Image (tube, rainbow, N blue to C red):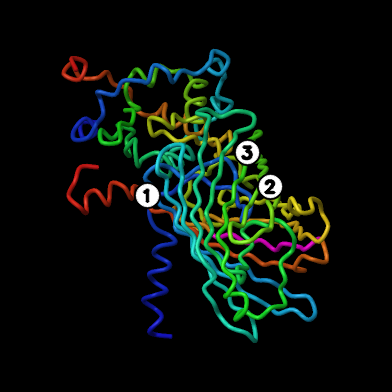
Amino acid sequence: MGASLGLGQNTSYTPDVRWQAPVGATARKNPLADKPEAAAGGKKLFLRNCTECHGIEGQGMVKKHAADLQLLVVQQESDGALFWKITNGNPDRGMPSFSRLPELQRWQLILFLRTLKPVNPPASAEAK
Amino acid sequence: MRSLRPLLAAVCALAFWTPARAQEAPYFVTYDHHLEEPGNLEIATSTTMGVPRSGQRFFIAPYMEFEYGVMGRWTTEVYVEGQTTSGDSTIFTGWRWENRFRPLKREHWINPVLYLEYEGLNEGSRIQKEVVGNAPDFGEPNSELRQTRAHELETKLILGSNLHDWNISENFIVEKNLSANEGFEFGYALGVSRPLGRMASGSNCRVCRENFAAGLELYGGLGSTNGFGFHDTAHYLAPVISWQVGDNASLSFSPAIGLTHQSNPVLLRFGYSYEVRGVRQKLARLFGSKP
């Protein structure tokens, strides 16, 4: 974790307040919640599709303005909200839609995201 | 053969190297609503082979495609194309520049994309990337076809939906040849496809269901303002399959069956595409500026 807190980690990431999942989407449950072994496939999908902007450990690339997926502000989102964000993307902020991935693969991605260790942003980042 | 080994090794390295992208719909003609990721460049080469009717000649029409994600909702693409007709000659048939714009930010039941393309072609063009208007005449020699230049504007309304794991796409095409008084020509393309695997395995398998997508396309011309309808038009029904052979590369194949006498009996299409990620950043680094 120390390495991921070093160069390039986007701990100063602040969510786009206009990018909010609707209530109905937020309440959706992960159909793979009782299959933690599916997170291995989620890791593979993450390495294929997400690391270019979010980094191998999900720490977020500062230059890409990508979310640090380890932050509490991300980890506290419900599975349904993350599913909605992966599905819709936020094209004006550079996050593409991944609706072309089968639904179960998007849920697998979320299983893997939950394995990233959540951290609070350091005080220096909060001060910004 | 020995001299080809470095080339083969380079091709294999390109095909099986580096991180990947989501499985794309396997269509050759139909566009879905997904655009290229911003800053990425997709380089693709495809070939359309026309199996002739009696009295016609076999042709091979290759084309290269460079697709770049300018912004999250704007993708631009340049094509160059040519063709070889058996017993005739090989000619360069022209180039195309297309742009796709996605007006809506979020995913909806139906997602529209607006398409605008300029084509600087000659009448020898055979790639049949879209089928519009009335069926072309396959009887004339290339020496004559290449003399007739066409400057064309093409627009499409692309509608795409993802229903569960199915992609359903509809394209409505209007084309205007600015070099001839042919009126406005119309065409359509419909596609439905699905990845063969719903879940990703934890292993790095290549030949497993999750790396394949299959579907069906239906496309054809609808005449022009001089005569709208199915009369003297070409239509094709085409199964399609794609295989993500590497993390950034995919192979596609489609045997299209001609449905009318004006169609080729069979069009065989082969495609290979390779995605280069983060081209904008790479170029910025190359020229020493901040991305």
Q: State which quadrant residue B197 falls in.
A: top right
- Using the rendered image, report if marks 3 and 1 lie on a common chain: yes
Distance between mark 2 and mark 1 Cα atoms: 27 Å
Looking at the image, residue B115 lies above or below residue B59: above
Task: Pick out the residue farthest to the top.
Answer: A23
The picture places residue B31, in percent across and down from the top left corner, at: 60, 47
Q: Amino acid at mark 2?
A: Gly
The verdict on a common chain for dots 2 and 1 is: yes
Identify the residue at image location x=49%, y=40%: A41
Q: Amino acid at mark 3?
A: Gly
Residue under label 3, please give it.
B160
Q: Which residue is disc 1 drawn over?
A: B277
CB under 8 Å between discs 3 and 2: no
Across and down, in percent, residue A33 comes to 54, 25
- Output the chain of dot 2: B
A100 left or right of B140 in image:
left
Q: Amino acid at mark 1?
A: Arg
Residue range of the region highlighted in magenta in the rendering: B251-259
- Residue B57 drawn at (x, y percent): 70, 80
> Total of numbered circles in the picture?
3
Indicate the quadrant containing the N terminus of chain B: top left, top right, bottom left or bottom right. Answer: bottom left
Label 2, secondary structure: give it. Answer: strand
Query: Viewer-proximal residue, B191 or A38?
Result: B191
Residue B61 as seen in the image, left or right of residue A109: right
> Sequence order check: which comes first, mark 3 or mark 2?
3
Q: Is residue A53 part of the magenta span, yes or no?
A: no
Q: Position of residue B286 (x, y in %)?
A: 22, 54
